[in-house]
Image (tube, rainbow, N blue to C red):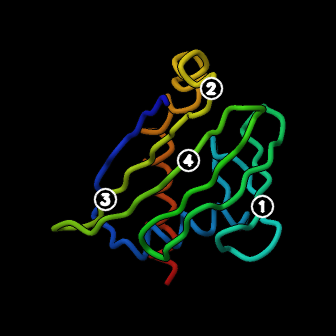
Amino acid sequence: MWSNEYTAISSLPAAAIWNALKALHEGRLTYEGSDTFVLHGPFTKGTRVSVTPVGQDTFESTIVDLVDNFTYADETTFGDTKLLFRHTLVPVEGGTQVTHRLEISGPSAAEVGPELGPQISGDFDVSMAKLFEQAKELANRG
């Protein structure tokens, strides 16, 4: 298995960040540099999601873990390789700690992970900063 994660703290409460994360994955929110999501059913475990990264082809993913205001994870399978993307929100003093993790698993993960993983997760810091900006804007709208 290969993995990488990025963690940052926002002064926003978990519910505000969760609202933006949910809106993004439901396809109701987009912003510069974000993937585009199309949900094929309710926002719940087991639902398929079409994901289109900027400038790339669309692929299918499945929500594999979802606990409101705490965690969202989806998994994509390419042949014998699985990509698991997880957001975890943890309340901390003064706000919320958010971790975005990528795990690449399967028989070829040791070969594929070191090359593909950094390409995918290299912008987690920028993506999270933009998610926090969107969460703040949504919270300010009331």
Check disc 3 and report the residue beneath it: 10
Check disc 4 and report the residue beneath it: 85
Comparing 61 with 93, the one in front is 61
Q: Earlier in the sequence, mark 2 or mark 1?
A: 1
Give the mark toward the camera: 2 or 4.
Answer: 2
Secondary structure of the residue carrying tag 3 is strand
Q: Residue furthest bottom?
A: 142
Residue 84 spot, x, y in % from top left: 58, 45
Residue 34 spot, x, y in % from top left: 64, 46
Give the mark toward the camera: 4 or 3.
Answer: 4
The residue at the point 65 percent across, 38 percent down is: 82
Q: Earlier in the sequence, mark 2 or mark 4?
A: 4
Q: Residue furthest front?
A: 107
Give the mark toward the camera: 3 or 1.
Answer: 1
How far apart are the two marked residues, 2 and 4, measured between alpha carbons? 18 Å
Check disc 2 and report the residue beneath it: 107
Secondary structure of the residue carrying tag 1 is strand
Secondary structure of the residue carrying tag 4 is strand
How far apart are the two marked residues, 2 and 1, measured between alpha carbons? 24 Å
Tag on residue 109? Answer: none
Three-letter amino acid code at the position of disc 2: Pro
For residue 30, which quarter of the picture? bottom right
Give the tally of numbered discs: 4
Residue 24 spot, x, y in % from top left: 63, 61
How far apart are the two marked residues, 4 and 3, measured between alpha carbons? 20 Å
How far apart are the two marked residues, 3 and 1, measured between alpha carbons? 29 Å
Secondary structure of the residue carrying tag 2 is loop
How far apart are the two marked residues, 3 and 2, measured between alpha carbons? 37 Å
Three-letter amino acid code at the position of disc 3: Ser
Give the mark toward the camera: 3 or 2.
Answer: 2
